[in-house]
Amino acid sequence: MLFELFSGSVRTALPIFCAFAFAFGTIVGAAKYEGRGTLLRGLEAAVLALVGAVLARLFLGAALWLDGFSAGSCLVAAWLFFPIAALVDLAASIGTEPSLGDPALLLWMATIVGAVGGALDGTYRIHAWRGRGWLTFGLDYTWGLTGSAHACLLHVINAFWGDHADEPARDQRQGVHRYRSGFRPMGGFVFTQGNTMSNCRDRYRSTGLFKHEQLHCWQSRVFGPVFILTYAAWAMLFFVPGAVAGKLTGGGVWRGIQWYSYYNNPWEVWAYTVGGYKPSGPEDLRLTWDRRIVGFWSMIFYGLFTVGMALPARRDSMTRSSRPSGTTSIGRKRRASR
């Protein structure tokens, strides 16, 4: 399996990733007049680009190998670890075979996320290697790969929009990227994906809001794709009920949606116990849920989510068990990769 995962094209690409990472890190260091630290910044970027790419590729490769690199397992992995790409692929492949059923494509996506994310982590020195940096980095490019893929997209957008904070005492070795300005779906809010906070201004750094966003980083690392998928599913499920509740309570349709989909979302309820500000006007109080209500709906919601995830897996297992012996998906994978 290792030989197939790291074929000639991959072995050629990895040094190229490292070279670009070293160059980028060195340029950033030179722009900050760091002297000898310039080369150290570039070296850390290159090493983490290599390790991140290898780690992400190994992790996803092992997950796909457990099911014989079948097209079904590839599509499941795509929805788990690259949901945005899976949505685009679904829309683009109506009436045809989904592109993300190809394991080679998925593995390259994981490799690029690991390389780009690792290069940026090293360039901005976010991991505390004398502390839990080994854990944060390891989780970011394995189980937390979903958040890291989204973080890479956020870095691309903020390259034209944001202002990356890089103060040695306040930002480096904190386990997160922080953009003082940048993309956010709602004005005045911080937007966090994976290990990256966008629009987290300097005045937020010493407040509970930073701890709130930092917890989202850990939720992404520890709960992986479950965090992002259930967060989005909750927001969509309670969109219409929120609009109705907002209309009935007089708070307005948008305020109702915001409370039901966002503030009452279990992941946000947890994060707001750590820090952050929630509006508390009369209309808001009529829309907020007691924690016991959140807990009640959470049990129902996560139970249904678990069943919904288990049924397709069981159906796929029954389908594969009914195939004639001798037909494998590995052969198709090998032919596709030649």
Image (cartoon, rainbow, N blue to C red):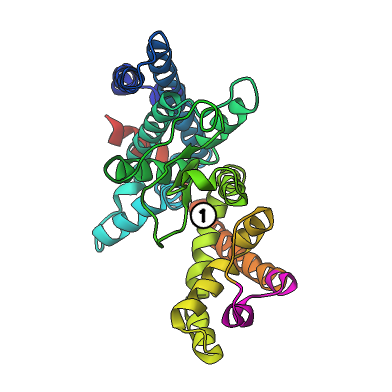
In magenta, the rendered stretch is 280-294
In this picture, residue 191 sits left or right of residue 206:
left
In this rendering, position of residue 282 left or right of residue 20? right
Q: Name the residue nearer the viewer: 174 or 303.
A: 174
Residue 316, relative to residue 103: is it above or below?
Answer: below
Question: Is the residue 37 above or below the residue 73 in the image?
Answer: above
Q: Position of residue 21 (x, y in %)?
A: 34, 22
- Does 83 sit left or right of 258 as displayed? left
State the image quarter where residue 103 is shown: top left
Residue 251: percent from left, percent from top:
51, 84
- Residue occupying the far bottom of the picture: 248
Q: Where is residue 88 in the image (x, y as percent from the top left)?
A: 30, 56
Residue at 44% of width from left, 53% of height from top? 79
Snapshot quadrant of residue 121:
top left
Label 1 amino acid? Answer: Ile
Q: Where is residue 236 in the image (x, y as percent from the top left)?
A: 47, 70
Tag 1 secondary structure: helix
Q: Which of 206 and 333 is in front in this view?
A: 206
Which residue is pictured at 64% across the width and 59% down the height? 272
The verdict on residue 261 being magenta is no
